[in-house]
Image: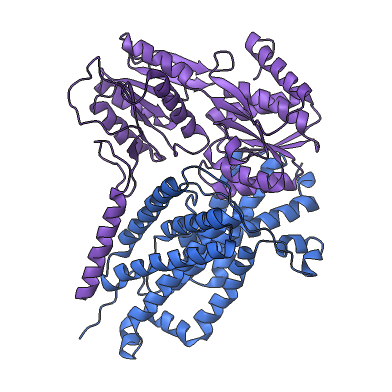
Chain colours: A blue, B purple
Amino acid sequence: MIADFFTITVLVGILTSGIRLATPYLFAAIGETFSQRSGVLNLGVEGQMLLGAFAAFYVSYITGNLWLAVLVAIVVGALMGLIMAFVSVNLQAQQGISGIGFYLFGLGASDLLFQKLVGTVKIANSFSPVYIPVLSEIPGLGEIIFQQNVLVYVAFALVPVAWFVLNRTTLGLKIHAAGENPAAADSLGVSIAGVRYFTIILGGILSALAGASLSIAQSNVFQQGMTSGIGFIAVALVYFGGWRPWGVLGGALLFSMVNALQLWIQVKGVGIPSDIAVMMPYVLTILVLVASVSRVRGPSALTKPFEREN
Amino acid sequence: MKNAVRLFALLAILVMALGACTPAATPTAAPEPTKAPEVAATEAPAPTDVPVEPEGPFRVAVVMPSAINDMAFSQSIYDALVRIQEEMGGPDKFEIVYSEGMFNVDDAAAAIRDYASQGFDLVIAHGSQYGSSLQEIAPDFPETSFAWGTTVDTFGQPNIFAYEAAADQGGYVNGVLAASLTKSSTIGVVGPIETGDAKLYVDGFKAGVAATNPAITVNVNYIGSFSDVALAAEAANTHIAAGADVMTGTAQMVVGAIGKADEAGALWFGTQSNQTSLAPKIVVASQVYHWEVVLSQMIELIQAGTLGGQSFSINLENGGEVIEYNPDYAVPAEVQALAETTIKGIIDGSIKTK
């Protein structure tokens, strides 16, 4: 039975699904990596995702213009990030609590707007796969990597970009300083507030894109609460990845590949009960987390608001 | 800093204003502050602490796990209540109040208790996960009638009705139709969690396919969630990649799968609510739950003084389950005839659906 399972079709299917499923996690977790590296825990990711998912869906539903939908999601995410930054930087709110507040706000607001503006579940225009010339024709690999929708490419391209910005630029150094020793950085003339505003707004934008990737790429509908915990798993993936973009990529791929694997296991009728199958991604992620977490230390100033001493 | 405080105050007002924009809320307290779960389908009535007078409207409150427009489980009960309301002569005769999106059982329990203490004639807990809460709450309100489903268990209490759907019956008919329409001989099924109504439906569907053509492969995946629309979409992708040209699925997250089926041009069979409006090109038929068939029996009993203790089932025979075709999809006459024969066979007992 197991030997029959791993055919080329199934393997290609698992890898293709896994890469697609990793997309929203990547967007959200890379955004969260930026804000955590600068010392701010954003637990509102799920709420930002929901508003982004709704905004993108609604614009696509009304205008059919997907790029406009992405743009509006970016604006909505940036606004959510701006408010979040104000609350955690200027008002110095407890980040765990205010983050949950933002989650609930996003949950409620997206629901309310959906009910008022759309009313019932509808299908809207969504991104179709883009076949990269030449590369998409490589047997197997072409289908897995080079026949995805555009948001998948953007999400994966974000990983090296994030790595570069965080590790090879002055901005990255400032973000690191804001998260490790804000007082020292401040005395050297780094604007902690400025850095944190930047990372939190960027986090908001990427969370909203994660939501958009759900409603106008991964699927073509919006439903209340459709993010279904992805935003919270994304926060966990940042810890999992040790606050490094490549680590986050590893975590997102591991979780999504196992999720894709369990979908195929059930489809192919390998005799594993569905209840066990659906647990697999979570169990495996926890196991890897337990095995790896002790090695990495998070940013020292994480969750600590910064106040200048005069 | 002063400006900052002003800005924050402004935002706070904005948020509150947004909250005020929700439709007429009922006098109940909302269990979730940022949402507006209690929305009256009718004009909000004047608050009343007096027991219901016989001339007043029959008052029903319902608590459900997802939204009233989920195209599935929650919508099925809401639509049924609206149909009863139309039949009974409008909001003056039959008042409906609901709490939706109650995935959280504790919130649902608070809402159920709230409605009971407001003197509703019938409080419906629409979700088998609410059972243990109801078991605790019902004895505290002996004058109030409760209904919950899907189940057959009234906990032996005199003020609890139980209701369920013979989901396997419509599932079987859908299976017969699906088996007759597939060209690739592969059918995909997307389910939430392998239990209750979903398992009944899926097993009935598989039996219907097998009875029609045992050579057809039915691939099933349960995604482990009632809300993960994106994973349901990916489950549908999996089925399409595995060669399915006809699909079905149950629970509210299947809208993600229907969207993917629509993109791929695969046929879709719905259940719980009529899903034609979502994808008119590909939905062939839906098994629709007409809960009003059993709800009106409960209402009659309540008006005659019996508050519970009985369990009800909707099925093809009593008209609580109806196979509703998409008028825009032309099902071949012989296939439709086969479905009719199947329905007759299930009703007279010559066809076993499980």
The residue drawn where x is 62% and y is 21% is B169
In percent of width and height, residue B19 lies at 30, 50
In percent of width and height, residue A226 lies at 50, 49
Q: In this view, does A41 lie to the left or right of B282?
A: left
Q: Is residue A203 left or right of residue B217?
A: left
Determine the image quadrant of residue B96.
Answer: top left
Residue B198 seen by the camera: yes
Note whether A103 is above or below B54 in the view shown.
below
Quadrant of image for the C terminus of chain A: bottom left
The residue drawn where x is 67% and y is 44% is B261
Pick whichever, B285 or B202, lies toward us: B285
Q: In this view, does B332 lie to the left or right of B237?
A: right
The residue drawn where x is 80% and y is 53% is A8
Note whether B124 is above or below A232 in the view shown.
above
In percent of width and height, residue B1 lies at 21, 76
Residue A292 seen by the camera: no
In percent of width and height, residue B58 lies at 31, 20
Pick whichever, B82 or A280, lies toward us: B82
Which residue ends up furthest to the left in the rendered image?
A: B50
Determine the image quadrant of residue A248.
Answer: bottom right
Pick whichever, A166 or A116, lies toward us: A116
Note whether A78 is above or below A15 in the view shown.
below
